[in-house]
Amino acid sequence: MNYLKKIYHFGLALLSAVIFGFPSRKLKVIGITGTKGKSSTLFLAGRILEKAGYTVSWISSLSLKIGEKEYINPYHLTMPGRGFIQRFMKKTLKKGTEFFLLEVTSEGINQYRHKFINFDTVVFTNLQPEHLESHGGWENYKKAKKKLFLSPSRSKTIIVNLDDENSGFFLNAPAKSKIGFSINPEKTSDEVSQIIKCRDIIINSQEICFKIKDVPFKLNLLGNFNLYNALAAISIALFYKVDLKIIKGALEEIEKVEGRMEEIKIGQDFRVFVDLAHTSDSFREVFELVKLMRAGDSKIIVVFGSAGGGRDKWKRPVLGKIASQFADLIILTNEDPYNEPAENIIEDIIKGIPEHQYFLKIPNRREAIGRALKLAKNSDIVLILGKGTEATYIEKGKNYPWDDRKVTKEELKKIYGL
């Protein structure tokens, strides 16, 4: 980013904060960053804090929430602009909000959208390669994320996933207190004052079970990644003195996280899941989880594409390779081509698929989803990856209303004549 752009973004952040009266100073703001798990961690932590009796608001890629009013995020942005965030926080104060939760992205940090927000707590979930072209490489991506932890307030608390190899990079920042979380009962660290650990872990195709301080948890969520998301949320809640039994009650009430391994059911005899997965690691994690669900000779059918606009072109063949290792049928389609030729994106993905692997190219996403559902038989598993709860589809500079979950239900109803 050149000097003039930096001045523009910084000035806009300052102006927005001034206009709306620096609302974050009157809130307990929790900022959550990382490559994966931001929205799920935010959602779980928010539900726990609500269960504990606090008034909670948030901005996430999943939804926007002011007090009791919550609605799907209609924008194609995880972290909106500075004026939007400051105005939103101002509105939440009028609703009596005590805690404000915010997903913080590397792109948002580079544009100073985090500036003049007084973070009470900052959370690091994990770090994997993403947005490398726009940041100019891996090291710049890491440094962008870390800027959240280098915000001026030394009274803030840092909560970090100690099982991520980059944890030390983020812990090496000024803070009043530093807390770690880990699924490894033997984990130690001299850099934190407290480590939240879980033990007796059981992860299967139906639930996640574990214990913290002899309190048993049985969650309706799926996958190792959701264990980490839950542990991050638990760490946040424990820091704010929420009783562990209240935390347990809140988490066990949650049936799903919207758009994150969300199962779509209308009575069909096969399983269908919609998930945001769009990075190589999240792809592998979803497939590893689904592999546990397979029964007998059931097949895995996957529908996915990759974002256009020059975004992480390197990962396209990687996604193709991972899908070919797990799926019985791959259906390649559009995700969000932006202004890039959709065919080029699909061809990049194909480069990672072995020549012997059978796949279909169906650029129209609705048609691709419909074909996958028609081909599915008893006990098969259909995965629709890449968009989750995103409410728009972007092609040739235009935004179109979209929801993978809604489209999937509509296509299933066509098949069953409902």
Image (cartoon, grey):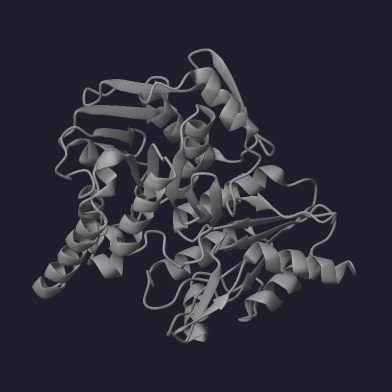
What residue do we see at 68% from left, 39% from top? Answer: 205
What residue do we see at 40% from left, 28% from top? Answer: 235
Q: Quadrant of residue 19?
A: bottom left
What residue do we see at 84% from left, 72% from top? Answer: 414
In front of the other: 101 or 26: 26
Position of the C terminus by quadrant: bottom right
Q: Quadrant of residue 385?
A: bottom right
* Residue 315 image point, x, y percent: 42, 66
* Residue 277 image point, x, y percent: 52, 57
In front of the other: 196 or 121: 121
**Residue 206 falls left or right of residue 337:** right
What residue do we see at 31% from left, 56% from top? Answer: 86
* Residue 356 image point, x, y percent: 62, 71
In front of the other: 63 or 86: 86
* Residue 31 image point, x, y percent: 33, 44
Position of the N terminus by quadrant: bottom left
